[in-house]
Amino acid sequence: MTIWVLALLAIPVGFAVVLGLRRNPRRWMRRLMFLNGVIGFAAVTFLVLAIFGPVAPAFAQTAEDSSASVGQAYLAASIAVAGSSIGAAIAVAYTGAASIAAISEKPEMFGRTMVFVGLAEGIAIYGLIIAVLILARV
């Protein structure tokens, strides 16, 4: 339920950003880059705390071996998703640019070029499947 509330809040913010980018693109791009940096810094901070942070005493008294393997499984799943998403983003960037160039010369090539862009997006889905398989064994 909370995710839907956050998603509903993100819709007007997205429209405001799009309108701001149309009115004053330079200022809004700086704002978005700053926001992206803040979110990235927070993500790295949480990752470092999750890996090297203190262990709660109640959790430490359970089983040390299982907690270490669970943490490693979560880390492996996150690396699989992150790596495949970054790879898919790079692949979509190149194939998307090439497909736009091909479509501008021959508009009837749209269907063929979108197949390659879709295959590039499939890389992220493969990473997500690997993460689900890893977490299913925990």
Image: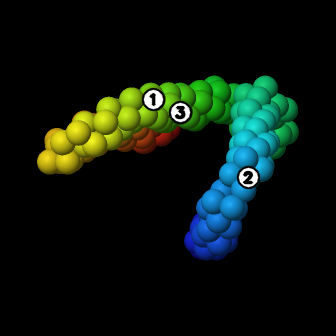
Residue 112 percent coordinates (x, y) = 17, 41
Instruction: From the viewer's side, name the closer residue of 41 and 21.
Output: 21
Q: Are marks 3 and 1 in contact (CB under 8 Å)?
A: no
Residue 32 percent coordinates (x, y) = 72, 48
Say whether residue 106 is left or right of residue 122: left
- Return the disc, 3 or 2, that comes first in the chain's sequence: 2
Circle 3 residue: 82
Q: Are marks 1 and 2 in contact (CB under 8 Å)?
A: no
- Return the disc, 3 or 1, that comes first in the chain's sequence: 3
At 74% across and 33% down in the image, what residue appears?
44
Name which quarter of the figure residue 70 lies in: top right
Instruction: From the viewer's side, name the closer residue of 126 and 67.
Output: 126
Q: Which mark is residue 28?
A: 2
Q: Quadrant of the N terminus?
A: bottom right
Q: Secondary structure at mark 2?
A: helix
Circle 1 residue: 90
The chosen color scheme is rainbow
Name which quarter of the figure residue 40 lies in: top right
Name which quarter of the figure residue 55 lies in: top right
Say whether residue 116 is left or right of residue 23: left
Three-letter residue code for mark 2: Trp
Three-letter residue code for mark 1: Ile
Q: CA distance from mark 3 to mark 1?
A: 12 Å
Q: Nearer the viewer, mark 1 or mark 2?
A: 2
